[in-house]
Amino acid sequence: MKRTLVLSTLAVASTLALAACGEATESGNTDATTSATSTATTTPETTSATTATTEADGEISADHNDADIMFAQMMIPHHQQAVEMSEMLLAKEGIPAQVVEFAQGVIDAQGPEIDRMNAMLEAWGQRPVTDSGGMDHGEMGGMDHGEMGGMDHGEMGGMSGMMSQEDMTALEEAQGTEAARLYLEQMTAHHEGAVDMARDEVADGQNPHAITLAEQVINDQEVEIAQMQQMLTDL
């Protein structure tokens, strides 16, 4: 009787030991699988992000020509003026809601584009433009009158849809619906000038990053011109 009891006890103990061992092995396998899966999942994502960053940096640093430099250095103050006009309008009362929304959209879109063009100029070893029209010929990348199309400071305000100081004053003094109408009329001409400049870049530029941005300007601003024409009709 005692021998039978001892054997039974040993059998139960062996069974429990084997079960515990199996659980430990299963747990170990699970942990190893989880670790391997985590490593496999994380590594490609990290590599992909690094590759994307490298490719983006390489694109900006690619070959460029005078047309690329001119596009960035002229489009920056052009965009800055559009932002200034939009901020001026948003400070007024009595502006229709759809015009307010449009003006905010101009700020949201063109602000980041200014940053992108400044980054391009830095990558090309050119001095970025940081103000809205205060640049001189030295700041325009050393280009002379021939390379700049023969324009001087006076002509800067009348080319490519840029508003003159008189235009800006008129917008600043206008109120309500009249201000909205004037803004839409001025911004339509402003956008048309930007599209013309962007088309020149697509035709004459060399840097793929600059050309892609120019194509984006054309597509976006042609759509916005149509929107402004409709808003003018609705006023």
Image: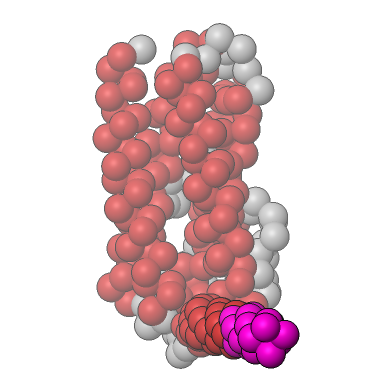
Q: Position of residue 122 (x, y in %)?
A: 64, 78
Q: Which residue sits at x=43%, y=42%?
A: 190
Pick the quarter of the image with the N terminus: bottom right
Q: Position of residue 25 (x, y in %)?
A: 59, 87
Q: Is residue 11 magenta?
A: yes
Q: Is residue 35 left or right of residue 223?
A: right
Q: Is residue 160 magenta?
A: no
Q: Position of residue 53 (x, y in %)?
A: 55, 80
The answer to which quarter of the image holds residue 85 is top right
In this rendering, is residue 202 above or below 178? below
Q: Which residue sits at x=52%, y=62%?
A: 74
Which residue appears farthest toward the front when viewing the image?
1
Q: Position of residue 106 (x, y in %)?
A: 49, 40
In this rendering, is residue 162 above or below 25? above
The answer to which of 170 and 183 lies nearer the viewer is: 183
The answer to which of 140 and 55 lies nearer the viewer is: 55
In this rendering, is residue 109 above or below 1? above
Q: Is residue 60 left or right of residue 98?
A: right
The answer to which quarter of the image holds residue 167 is top right
Number of numbered discs on residues: 0
The answer to which of 143 and 105 lies nearer the viewer is: 105
The answer to which quarter of the image holds residue 81 is top right
Q: Which residues are magenta?
A: 1-21
Magenta stretch, main secondary structure class: helix
